[in-house]
Amino acid sequence: MPSDKIHQITYLGALLFIAGVFLPLASIPIVGDISYYGVDSTSAIIVVILAVSAPILIHLKKEALTFVSAIAVWLVLLWPVIKNMGDGSDDGGSLLGDLVGKATDPLTNFASNLFMNINEFSWGGFIFLIGLVVFTVGCFITTMKARKS
């Protein structure tokens, strides 16, 4: 662990966030406990790799680039919402395309709404959110500190 407090915050945020990806975010009556990894494993693996990239950048003395890790994590988490923003007004798609889109894995559609619509988090959800906020703040402060030097 680095001796710099700002780097320690980034490491701690990454660790909490990565743990939160695999912990239960919420409990749904029929489904049971759900984690971000259980809902969308591909996105979960991507955000874990991106969260690990910030400590690696710090270790490689590229602290000025850690903000990219935080932005990339947020983009992956919010990608389903961003992608679906323009879908409401466009009726130019074919019927077959709409059917194929609706026939895809229902958990993927659930994942797009999960991050934005959870009203009651489980204990893992709080670790996920706290880790995400601490990671984001740590990355941006690390970047600002590196650019001042």
Image (cartoon, helix red, strand yellow):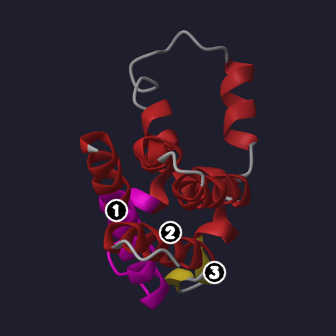
**Could you say which disc has been placed on residue 55 in the image?**
none
Dot 2 corresponds to which residue? 14
- For badge 3, the amino acid type reads Val
Q: Judge the density around disc 1: few (<14), some (14-19), many (≥20) Cα neighbours within 10 Å.
A: many
Q: Earlier in the sequence, mark 3 or mark 1?
A: 3
Residue toward you, 130 or 121: 130
From this view, report whether residue 40 is shown above or below residue 80: below
- For badge 1, the amino acid type reads Gly
Q: Earlier in the sequence, mark 2 or mark 1?
A: 2
Q: Residue at x 61, y 57 (%)?
A: 56
**Could you say which disc has been placed on residue 31 in the image?**
3
Residue 113 picture location, percent across and down: 46, 55
Dot 1 corresponds to which residue? 138
Question: Are circles 3 and 2 on residues that touch, CB within 8 Å?
Answer: no
Residue 100's image quarter? top right
- For badge 2, the amino acid type reads Ala
Question: Are circles 3 and 1 on residues that touch, CB within 8 Å?
Answer: no
From this view, report whether residue 144 is shown above or below residue 23: above
Residue 125 picture location, percent across and down: 44, 79
- Give the secondary structure at mark 3: loop
- Give the secondary structure at mark 2: helix
For the record, the magenta segment spans 115-137
| Majority secondary structure of magenta residues | helix
